[in-house]
């Protein structure tokens, strides 16, 4: 039977992944916390430590009690949650763009954006456009532009000389650079000044995925910190499951026609049930906290933690040359993501187990998420970590 053949193929593939220590198994986070007495968590993306905030949970609960557990419809058929437009408007004003549309995840927002940018099935629409994509962009971006069938060119990670070479060779009328503000595997930001110069020189525009930086920086977003890029921005995608502490994703733009095109063309918007009222209500409250003085205090605390860990690691490297980070210049490192390279999968898995026995949770990252031979611990700082927490982490890693 066909299914027996397929099942045999699946079994072999899974066995090969297990043999190479690349087989993925989800961690039961809350059960592990109880059973293994996890005291310190350096693995979650809750960068500002707000996902358990009672105000956020209560706002979600109130929205669900008012509008129901679910929406029972695509928003393009029947919009049943009156909070959704308020949420989108609030987010747009917070980041300084005119329009935002909310999706069930940042992943689906990227799929929707590139779907909207692709050619309509009109005989007369023949778009002259080309995407230039950083090769370490998220899987959702790759899936999005490949599905869209828009002409796409990959440039080496944050290698803007390589990007310029590709731009010079393009004859497209619309050249669109696709990049992440903060890359989550290496914890590196792109150089905004250099990218601004390239856009000016080649008449190019930008799509930025802000998923790992939204809510952070001193101003609450990478765009707000580098406002001079705004004139080149086509759209920004912002995931809501990291610093924002809830779920979903936004596409934001200053172009009304693009917003309309997304609503008319993007399948994840048209054919998906709209977001549950609980999520919309919780996220709206989360944004009100993050884009406030309280949020500023959390961001300042996170920046202090980054500087503290960075300086501790510099001292460690000075005393232990084998201690390796995948950071080109640690002295100017600005992000809350610190990748500690072990190389082999088995080595990093053993270290994760050792740390768990000490009550410390840090997750390993293995191929294909990162290049072969660069398996790593990804240490993620949060604003609610203390200096003592960071000291204990380093004592157990080294």
Image: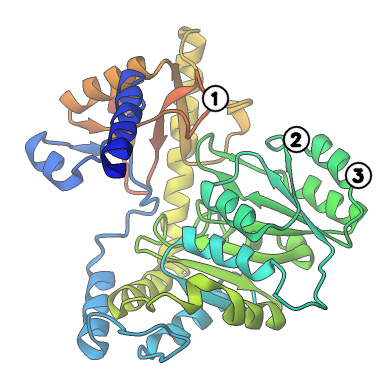
From the viewer's perspective, tell me whether residue 219 is left or right of residue 158: left
Residue 398 visible in the shown view: no
N-term-proximal mark, 1 vs 3? 3
N-term-proximal mark, 1 vs 2? 2
Residue 159: image tag: 2
Determine whether the residue tagged by mark 2 lies in a helix, strand or loop: loop
Residue where numbered disc 1 is placed:
326
Between 81 and 274, which is closer to the camera in this rendering? Answer: 274
Q: Nearer the viewer, mark 3 or mark 2?
A: 3
Residue 270 x, y percent position in the rendering: 49, 79
**Distance between the Cα atoms at labels 1 and 2?**
16 Å
Q: Quadrant of residue 219?
A: bottom right
**Distance between the Cα atoms at labels 3 and 2?**
16 Å
Residue 379 x, y percent position in the rendering: 39, 33
Q: Residue at x 35, y 23 (%)?
A: 16
Between 128 and 219, which is closer to the camera in this rendering? Answer: 128
Q: Nearer the viewer, mark 1 or mark 3?
A: 3
Q: Residue furthest front?
A: 1
Residue where numbered disc 3 is placed:
169
Residue 157 visible in the shown view: yes
Q: Residue at x 64, y 55 (%)?
A: 145
N-term-proximal mark, 3 vs 2? 2
Q: Residue at x 69, y 76 (%)?
A: 254
Q: Nearer the viewer, mark 1 or mark 2?
A: 2
On-image quarter of the N terminus: top left
Determine whether the residue tagged by mark 3 lies in a helix, strand or loop: loop
Determine whether the residue tagged by mark 1 lies in a helix, strand or loop: loop
Residue 225 x, y percent position in the rendering: 65, 58
Q: Residue at x 68, y 43 (%)?
A: 134
On-image quarter of the C terminus: top left
**Distance between the Cα atoms at labels 1 and 3?**
32 Å
């Amino acid at each position: 039977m066909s299914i027996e053949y397929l099942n045999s193929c699946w079994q072999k593939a899974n066995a090969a992944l297990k043999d190479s220590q690349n087989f993925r198994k989800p961690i039961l986070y809350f059960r592990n916390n109880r059973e293994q007495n996890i005291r310190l968590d350096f693995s979650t993306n809750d960068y500002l430590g707000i996902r358990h905030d009672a105000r956020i949970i209560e706002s979600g609960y109130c929205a669900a009690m008012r509008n129901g557990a679910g929406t029972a419809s695509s928003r393009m058929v029947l919009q049943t949650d009156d909070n959704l437009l308020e949420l989108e408007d609030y987010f747009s004003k917070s980041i300084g763009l005119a329009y935002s549309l909310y999706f069930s995840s940042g992943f689906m927002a990227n799929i929707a954006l590139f779907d909207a940018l692709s050619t309509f099935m009109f005989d007369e629409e023949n778009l002259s456009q080309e995407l230039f994509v950083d090769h370490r962009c998220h899987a959702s971006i790759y899936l999005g532009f490949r599905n869209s069938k828009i002409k796409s060119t990959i440039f080496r990670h944050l290698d803007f000389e390589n990007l310029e070479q590709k731009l010079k060779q393009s004859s497209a009328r619309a050249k669109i650079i696709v990049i992440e503000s903060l890359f989550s595997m290496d914890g590196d930001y792109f150089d905004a000044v250099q990218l601004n110069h390239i856009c000016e020189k080649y008449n190019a525009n930008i799509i930025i995925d802000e998923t790992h930086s939204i809510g952070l920086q001193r101003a609450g977003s990478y765009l707000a910190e580098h406002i001079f890029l705004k004139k080149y921005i086509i759209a920004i995608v912002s995931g809501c499951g990291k610093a924002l502490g809830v779920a979903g994703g936004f596409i934001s733009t200053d172009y009304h026609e693009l917003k309309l095109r997304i609503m008319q063309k993007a399948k994840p918007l048209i054919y998906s049930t709209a977001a549950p009222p609980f999520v919309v209500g919780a996220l709206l409250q989360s944004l009100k906290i993050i884009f406030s003085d309280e949020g500023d205090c959390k961001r300042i605390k996170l920046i202090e933690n980054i500087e503290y860990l960075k300086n501790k690691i510099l001292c460690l490297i000075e005393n232990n040359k084998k201690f390796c980070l995948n950071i080109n210049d640690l002295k100017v490192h600005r992000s809350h993501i610190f990748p500690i390279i072990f190389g082999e999968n088995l080595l990093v898995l053993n270290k994760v187990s050792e740390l768990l026995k000490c009550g410390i949770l840090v997750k390993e990252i293995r191929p294909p998420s990162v290049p072969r031979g660069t398996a790593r611990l990804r240490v993620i700082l949060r604003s609610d970590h203390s200096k003592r927490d960071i000291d204990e982490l380093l004592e157990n890693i080294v």
